[in-house]
Amino acid sequence: MRHCLSLKDLTKDEILELIEKAIQIKSKIKNREDYTPLKGIILGMIFEKSSTRTRLSFETGMKRLGGDAVFLSPRDIQLGRGETIEDTARVVSRYVDIIMIRTYEHQRILTFAKYSSVPVINALTDLLHPCQVLADLMTIKEKKGNIENIKVAFLGDGNNMANSWIYAAAVVGFELSVATPVDFAPNGVVVKEALELSKTTGAKITLTDNPQEAVNNADLIYTDVWASMGQEEQKEKKHALMKSYQVNKELTKFAKEDYIFMHCLPAHREEEVSADVIDDEKHSVVWDEAENRTYAQLATIMKLIGRD
């Protein structure tokens, strides 16, 4: 039994295979083929942290492929409060075939996975968001043809998305430049592990506080909100430090002429990204990116439970 808690849990070949599988699933769904490989499979969805896209993409995806999903909100389940995480994992995994968790502290999902008798998928923690980056890589494959010979520029907060991109670059071997204020740099342990892994994969990972340097000659510009859910008390400080990291038309001039823009959403226009960038139909692929969450996650579920 395997879990998907971080992209470093996967090999390069496995990531490439997942992307190809996700593209195949997308084609079958779009063509309305009779394709129900998840018939009889129930996904348990544990949400301590709410999300429009995460719930919809997992739940509708399961139903499209013949499976089902059970939604557990913070009112339905309280990890570690009233019942230990260990006991909750032991019980919930007796009822379902696979579990996804969207929570706060990363340690909570590590503990849950340790005591679960079925595979567990990380649908977001404060440290990592692997499902989103798998969908992002799928989108790059569709738009650019490959995910190995590209340069990605990530700007803004060194948050769970930045950390996940760092692991993705390290495993797959592409170039990544992360531009953040010094006070909000990516997780040090993640960076250390990724740089060590890069020695074998040939990835080029650069950390800088210079947005123009990061975006220079980039194929992809990526950003996220500056203050994530649960970090509202840091909003004022972050916004003061990150004004120069806004992705706007002036900054995009440093990228390749055919760059694409991505954002994991929800977006705050005129904060981390200007409206004329995110709404630019020539370069922005955020809506395709959001849709691809469904297919990347379905591919991951099928891999973990051994369904074709």
Image (cartoon, rainbow, N blue to C red):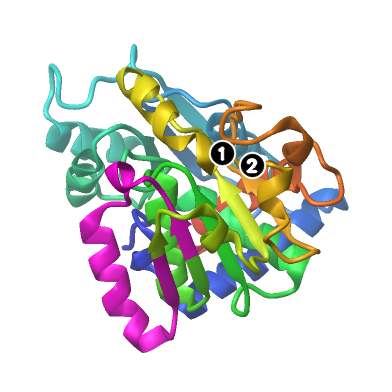
Question: Residue 260: image x %, image y %?
Answer: 73, 56
Q: Is residue 4 left or right of residue 222?
A: left
> Which residues are drawn in magenta?
177-206
Tell me the amino acid under the disc marked 1.
Answer: Phe
Which residue corresponds to the image point at 71% horizontal and 43% vertical from the top-left? 286
- Crowding around mark 1 (Cα neighbors within 10 Å: few <14, some 14 to 19, many 20+) is many
Tag 2: residue type? Gly
- Confirm whether residue 38 shows in the render: no
Q: Is residue 210 toward the left or the right of residue 119 in the image?
A: right
Q: Which mark is residue 58?
A: 1
Closer to the camera in the image, 295 or 129 = 129
Is residue 180 depicted above or below 141 in this figure? Answer: above
Q: Secondary structure at mark 2?
A: helix
The residue at 33%/85% (across/down) is 199
Q: Quadrant of the N terminus?
A: bottom left
Label tally: 2
Quarter the C terminus occupies: bottom right
Vertical arrangement, residue 235 with respect to residue 62, above or below: above
Q: Percent from the top left, x then y, of residue 57? A: 61, 37
Residue at 33% x, 62% y: name it. Answer: 2
Question: x, y (%) of residue 90?
Answer: 19, 39
Q: Residue 21 lies in what quarter of the image?
A: bottom right
Question: Of residues 126 and 307, which is closer to you in this image?
Answer: 126
Horizontal relation, residue 202 to residue 193: left or right = right
Instruction: Indicate the position of residue 130 as horizontal and vertical percent values.
Output: 44, 53
Say whether residue 35 is magenta: no
Between residue 148 and residue 83, name the one nearer to us. Answer: 148
Pointers 2 and 1 in contact (CB under 8 A)? yes
**What residue is pinned by disc 2?**
61
Q: Secondary structure at mark 1?
A: helix
